[in-house]
Image (cartoon, grey):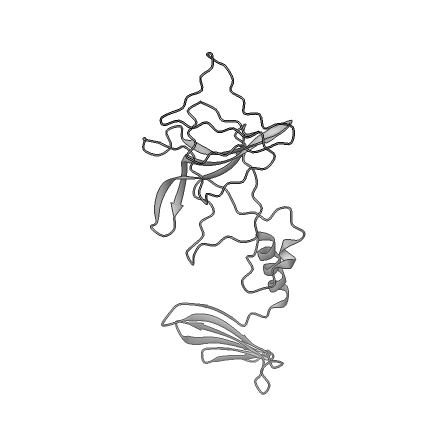
Amino acid sequence: MSKHVTTSGDYTLKVADSGTITLDTGLNIGQVHVTGDLLISGTQTTVNSTDLNINDNIIVLNANESGIGVTLNEAGIRIERGSLADVQFLFNENVIWNDPVSQTTKTGAFVLKDEAGSNIGLECRSISTGGGDLFLINAGTGVVSVSGTNNYENQVVDDDDLPNKKYVDDEIVSGLATINIKKIRDGVTTKTDVVVADIETNPGTASNIKVSVDGNNHITVYDNRTEIHDLRIHGSTI
């Protein structure tokens, strides 16, 4: 049998100090409807339902903060993990980071860590910077590492792939062993250089080595002779 209580003013239910008010909907698990705003003035609210559905698109934590930033330095969400350490998604006022847009140092950033303060990993496939630069390390001597991958240096095949140290080392060793370097040069206007040419790659031109200083060719070495300025050495003949 349904019952309705109507009053022309406020309505208060009061029990003894530290007492409990229970709204019992029976064994079939009914519903409690609150048509107006619900204000809970206690220090802790516990929800034991299996699923919690919230229509609001923004959840406000640390409400009514009056300080400059979060007074307790951190605010966020904590997830219980049974016998394992709980993990937290927090905003920490003390984290310092470099802003690539303004080129200034700022404080306050999101942190993933467990209840003991140890960092927690984050898995994602893409980081969007809105077209701006991406700063990864803002202090100390840390490095960006790909440890844990399988032969990462062999996967660097696309023009936009980032190489690691192993890839660079291998490329240098391979280059020195296979690449033919034709010229060593220094200078801007009057260049000093050593230039080599081989008949195999320059048909019609005898293989030679030319040494130039300040733009002037001083020494030319051929297969059968050496020319130094106006001096020519051919076999045992000068």
Q: Which residue is more in the foreground, 77 or 196?
A: 77
Image position, residue 136 (x, y; %): 47, 47
Looking at this rendering, what residue extends furthest in the right direction? Answer: 150
- Left or right: where 153 falls relative to 215: right
Measuring from the top left, give residue 164's x and y in whole percent: 57, 53
Q: Position of residue 86 (x, y in %)?
A: 57, 30
Q: How many marks?
A: 0
Q: Position of residue 108 (x, y in %)?
A: 39, 38
Which residue reaches farthest top?
A: 16
Residue that lies at the very extreme toward the bottom in this rendered image:
204
Q: Is residue 202 above or below residue 120?
A: below
Image quarter (top left, top right, bottom left or bottom right) of the N terminus: top right
Quadrant position of residue 170: bottom right
Say which residue appears at 41% left-offset and 34% top-offset.
37
Image height of 18 relative to 190, above or below: above
Q: Is residue 137 above or below residue 178?
A: above
Pick whichever, 29 or 138, lies toward us. 29
> Residue 192 sits in which quadrant?
bottom left
**Front residue (pair 41, 146):** 41
* Residue at 54 percent of width and 54 percent of height: 126
Residue 30 placement: quadrant:
top right
Q: Nearer the viewer, residue 34 or 211?
A: 34
Q: Is residue 133 above or below residue 147?
A: below
